[in-house]
Amino acid sequence: MQPYRNPDGHSGVAAYELGPDWIRVRFASGRDYLYSAASAGAGHVRNMQILAQAGEGLATYISKFVHDDYDRGP
């Protein structure tokens, strides 16, 4: 996983991992959540990938748009 840059130091996101149509987010609590095109929508996944790489705004985006739309397993 890549450490989340978090320049202001107040994010709930600690790290992330990107795939072609998914993003795995590790929160400061230590819990990981996988958001995929199937669960959250391809547009949201793309937006989250962009925010993750920028190191800003990911936690806010998740709480506003995809909070509970993570994969829950097979």
Image (cartoon, rainbow, N blue to C red):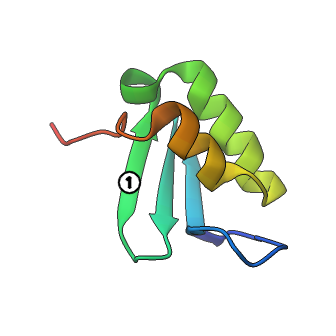
Which residue is rendered at x = 35% and y = 69% of the image? 31
Q: Residue furthest left?
A: 74
Which residue is rendered at x = 63% and y = 42% of the image? 61
The residue singled out by tag 1 in the image is: 33
- Please identify the quarter of the rendering in which residue 20 is found: top right
In the picture, which quadrant includes the N terminus?
Answer: bottom right
Q: Along the line of sight, which residue is nearer the eye, 46 or 12?
A: 12
Residue 20 makes an appearance in the image: no
Q: Position of residue 44 (x, y in %)?
A: 59, 27
Residue type for callout 1? Tyr
Mark 1 element type: strand
How packed mark 1 is, by other alpha carbons closer than 10 Å (few <14, some 14-19, many 20 or more), is: some
Q: Is residue 31 rendered to the left or right of residue 2?
A: left
Q: Position of residue 66 (x, y in %)?
A: 47, 34
Which residue is rendered at x = 56% and y = 37% of the image? 64
Residue 14 makes an appearance in the image: yes
In the displayed structure, would residue 46 be above or below residue 41?
A: below
- Please identify the quarter of the rendering in which residue 39 is found: top left
Q: Position of residue 50 (x, y in %)?
A: 76, 42
- Total numbered badges shown on the rendered structure: 1
In the picture, which quadrant includes the C terminus?
Answer: top left
In the displayed structure, would residue 67 be above or below residue 30?
A: above
Which residue is rendered at x = 49% and y = 21% of the image? 41
In the displayed structure, would residue 44 be above or below residue 10?
A: above
Q: Is residue 1 rendered to the left or right of residue 31?
A: right
